[in-house]
Image (cartoon, rainbow, N blue to C red):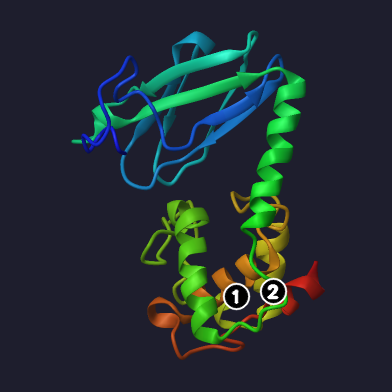
């Protein structure tokens, strides 16, 4: 972003860097799952021989195996709008030992930034926190307006599960729904994040003031794990 906005000097890889790049182990089969929130994009890494479209309303996957450690670069290969030129892709391939160390370092960073499980959260705090969790994890499928994408991803606005008893929605977010695109977020999000995003969906859009159990607490999620 700093390069796009002209806040960094032009170097060898000007406009080819990303804020967050992908890190994978060498000589391991890697699956990339793709979708898009706006228009068709295309994830392409020439050195891996991979090019897969990312299409709104669909989940597409691509597989690759990197044979040598190093930095590999690609770009969106689909003319997708005014920011098309600013969609680089960076993949860092590490030896297995280095990758294992990187994973442990990331876990430590996540733990340091984790929500305090002992904090007494207010409803307003959970909803505000949940809006951010939704934007980071859910919006590509369920959309910012909660309407989803008909035929592909269900709407949360007015959904009977979202407006019903909290137990069913907690279970769905924790464990996913086999045979659908709904992934299990239990291994990815902590109790506060899951409680917050569920609370947000129960207060957002036309759901506000309707349904049962409008606020879910972290202890509810912990009990359901």
Residue located at (69% from left, 55% from top): 111
Q: Which mark is residue 180?
A: none
Q: Position of residue 35 (x, y in %)?
A: 46, 40
Q: Is residue 151 above or below residue 76?
A: below
Q: Which mark is residue 168?
A: 2
Q: Are marks 1 and 2 in contact (CB under 8 Å)?
A: yes
Quadrant showing the C terminus: bottom right
Residue positioned most to the front: 9
In the image shown, does 40 or 83 lie closer to the viewer? Answer: 83
Residue found 43% across the figure and 47% down from its top: 57
Whichever of callouts 1 and 2 sits on the residue coming sooner in the sequence is 1
Q: Could you tell me which quadrant the N terminus lies in?
A: top left
Label 2: few (<14), some or many (≥20) within 10 Å?
A: few
Q: Secondary structure at mark 1?
A: helix
Front in this rendered view, residue 133 or 206: 133
Between 197 and 18, the residue placed more toward the observer is 18
Instruction: Give residue 2's quadrant in the image.
Output: top left
In the image, residue 223 sits, relative to residue 36, either above or below, namely: below
Q: Which residue is label 1 attached to? A: 161
Question: Which residue is at the far left?
Answer: 82
Q: Position of residue 26 (x, y in %)?
A: 68, 16
In this figure, what is the number of numbered marks? Answer: 2
Residue 120 % position (x, y) = 65, 84
- Is residue 68 depicted above or below 95 in this figure? above
Horizontal side, residue 215 vs residue 135: left or right:
right
Which quadrant would residue 10 be assigned to in this image?
top left
């Amino acid at each position: 972003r700093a390069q796009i906005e002209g806040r960094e000097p032009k170097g060898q890889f000007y406009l080819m860097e990303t804020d967050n790049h992908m890190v994978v182990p060498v000589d391991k089969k890697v699956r990339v799952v793709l979708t898009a929130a706006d228009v068709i994009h295309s994830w392409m890494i020439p050195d891996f021989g991979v090019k897969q479209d990312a299409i709104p309303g669909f989940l597409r996957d691509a597989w690759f195996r990197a044979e040598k450690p190093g930095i590999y670069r690609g770009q969106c290969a689909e003319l997708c709008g005014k920011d098309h030129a600013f969609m680089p892709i960076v993949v860092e391939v590490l030896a297995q030992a280095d990758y294992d160390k990187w994973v442990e370092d990331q876990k430590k960073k996540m733990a340091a930034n984790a929500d305090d499980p002992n904090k007494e959260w207010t409803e307003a705090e959970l909803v505000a926190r949940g809006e951010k969790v939704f934007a980071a994890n859910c919006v590509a499928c369920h959309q910012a307006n909660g309407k989803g994408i008909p035929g592909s991803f269900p709407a949360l606005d007015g959904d009977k599960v979202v407006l019903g008893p909290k137990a069913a929605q907690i279970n769905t977010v924790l464990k996913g729904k086999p045979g659908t695109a709904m992934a299990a977020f239990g291994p990815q999000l902590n109790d506060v994040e899951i409680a917050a995003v569920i609370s947000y969906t129960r207060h957002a859009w036309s759901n506000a003031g309707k349904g049962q159990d409008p606020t879910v607490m972290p202890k509810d999620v912990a009990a359901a794990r």
